[in-house]
Amino acid sequence: MLDPTQLFNYVGSVDQRLVRADTLVVTLGSYLDAGHAQALLNEHLTNSLPNSVLGHFDADQLFDYAGHRPQIVFDKDHFESFAAPEIALRQLSDADGKPFLLLSGPEPSLQWERTAAMVEHLIDQFDISQTVIVHGFPAPSPHTRPVLVTKFASDPALIPLNSGLPATFQMSASFTSLLTMRLGERGKHVVGLTAHVPHYLAGLDYPAAALSLMREVCEVAGLQLPEADLEERSQATVAEISAQVDDHDELKILTETLEQHYDAMLTQRGLPVRQEDIPTAEELGAQFESFLRELENKNNPGPEGFQPPVAPKS
């Protein structure tokens, strides 16, 4: 393996000796960021909390330009405004002034092992005690329920019993899944948070997913993060979706079915449910396996005639 430290460059003004934090939050993209949960969380945190860039990974070594095609603006007779990919490490302070780090950007396409080794190096350098990885995935969940967050970890002892999925799956790997394994092999504490985004909203902004993820980050990492903006956007989006659902009988039936699946997941975790007639654990596991097989398909349209709204921007 080539030297991992050559993948990361600090911003010139950063004094590495002064950077210390207990928690690293990772929102690196994957093959699907359902509900744009990672992007919305990044936007919210960087817009609402004091922060500064510590450095960047060398995206030119890690990014597949031909496979992902960054945007570029053509203005009449010339090109300008190339949207270069950026994998950045930031230091933020929560509402109480407690520092934490945020690693965000597109998923590395190349050199996964080397990148994971560099993340481990940063964890050691800044005395990080835990890494929290967050993302969303399309699931058989309704918009009428709070967003469920499934947890995974480098060591199952780090998360509550029955907080994972109710079955075993084989699926395409992401960089963050490999990162979780490699850090765990080195004895590092990693907790993953996966928001269950209604599959019919997976391709749109769904602030409720980002809000649920942020609340879980607060609980896991002991951070105080503001949620007013996300709360308002979440309520507005859900209200608009519900108004459209009320006009379609097909969507009402779909929502009721998904509510049953949601309640079944709560049953698996020993939490109270709203329905008595719910699917079995085997039926629920089969549903999740079916949805996981479709994760690489980024097109998740809703039922015919349904046009889910884009979350209002603040």
Image (spheres, rainbow, N blue to C red):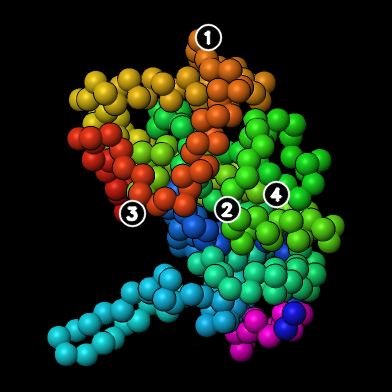
Residue underneath mark 2: 172
The amino acid pointed to by label 1 is Glu
The residue labelled by disc 1 is 276
* Residue 161 on image: x %, y %: 75, 31
Q: Is 14 inside the magenta-drawn segment? A: yes
Q: Quadrant of residue 271?
A: top right
The amino acid marked with disc number 3 is: Ser
Which residue occupies 55% across, 26% down?
284
Which one is in front in this view, the residue at disc 2 or the one at disc 4? 2
Q: CA distance from mark 2 to mark 1?
A: 35 Å
Q: Residue at x 68, y 44 (%)?
A: 152
Q: Are marks 2 and 4 in contact (CB under 8 Å)?
A: no
The answer to whether any part of residue 261 appears in the image is: yes
Q: Residue 314 bears which disc, if any?
A: 3
Mark nearer the N terminus (3 vs 1): 1
Q: What's the CA distance linking mark 3 and mark 1?
A: 39 Å
Q: Which residue is mark 4?
A: 191
Mark 2 or 1: in front is 2
- Residue 122 occupies quadrant: bottom right
Sequence-first tag of 1 and 4: 4
- Front residue of 2/149: it is 2
- In the drawing, does residue 55 fall left or right of residue 147? right
Residue 143 position (above or below residue 292): above
Report the magenta residues as a range.
Answer: 3-17
Amino acid type at circle 2 is Ser
